[in-house]
Amino acid sequence: MIDERQAVAAFAALGQEHRLRIVRQLVTAGPDGMAAGMLAEAVGVSGTNLSFHLKELSHAGLVTSRREGRSIIYSAAYPDLSELIQFLMRDCCQGRPEVCAPAVAALAACCLPTGDTPHA
């Protein structure tokens, strides 16, 4: 479970325009991730800048990397991102589920297989 110190580091890393774009692009790319060159092009930064931003995101636990042949493939760290979202939403309702309902509905819409419905 993520603690406050880790959450602060993650939010600090995401508090920069290019880093936020990188994470969003990697989330969209899915678990297969993206090669560094394609990622740099997709978010509109140079390779050098991309490396700098990826280092910050990696230190914050939001991005992972792996080598495939001559390429380095970057992926979103889905478990850590999920924990960050849970950290934000923990105890959000305080007995009022309508407070969290929009966030739950948005996540359910993108995360459920086609034809499934969220359980109340």
Image: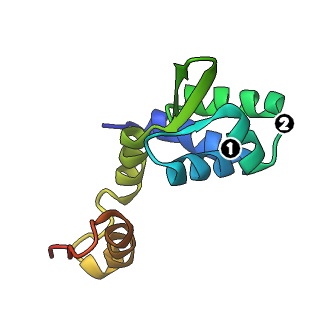
Residue lying furthest front in this view?
A: 69
Q: Nearer the viewer, residue 45 or 115?
A: 115
Name above or below for residue 116 compared with residue 14: below
Q: Is residue 13 left or right of residue 65?
A: right
Q: Nearer the viewer, residue 95 or 30?
A: 30
Q: Position of residue 97 (x, y in %)?
A: 25, 77
Mark seen at residue 46 = 2
Left or right of 2 in this view: 76: right
Q: Quadrant of the N terminus?
A: top left
Quarter of the figure with residue 96? bottom left
Q: Is residue 112 above or below residue 78?
A: below
Establish if 64 lies above or below 110: above
The answer to whether residue 28 is above or below residue 112 is above
Q: Is residue 101 left or right of residue 77?
A: left
Q: Residue at 39% across / 73% down in the picture? A: 106
Element at label 1: helix
Query: Dividing the image into 4 quarters, which one contains the C terminus?
Result: bottom left
Q: CA distance from mark 1 to mark 2?
A: 13 Å
The kind of secondary structure element at disc 2 is loop
Instruction: Give the residue type that dot 2 points to.
Output: Ser
Residue extending farthest left? 120
Residue 29 lies left or right of residue 37; in this view the side is left
Q: Residue flagged by tag 1: what amino acid is it?
A: Arg
Residue situated in front as seen by the camera: 15 or 76: 76
In the rendered image, which residue does mark 1 sit on?
19
Quadrant in which residue 77 is drawn: top left
Give x and y (percent) for residue 12: 63, 41
Q: Position of residue 61 (x, y in %)?
A: 49, 31
Q: Which residue sits at x=68%, y=41%? A: 39
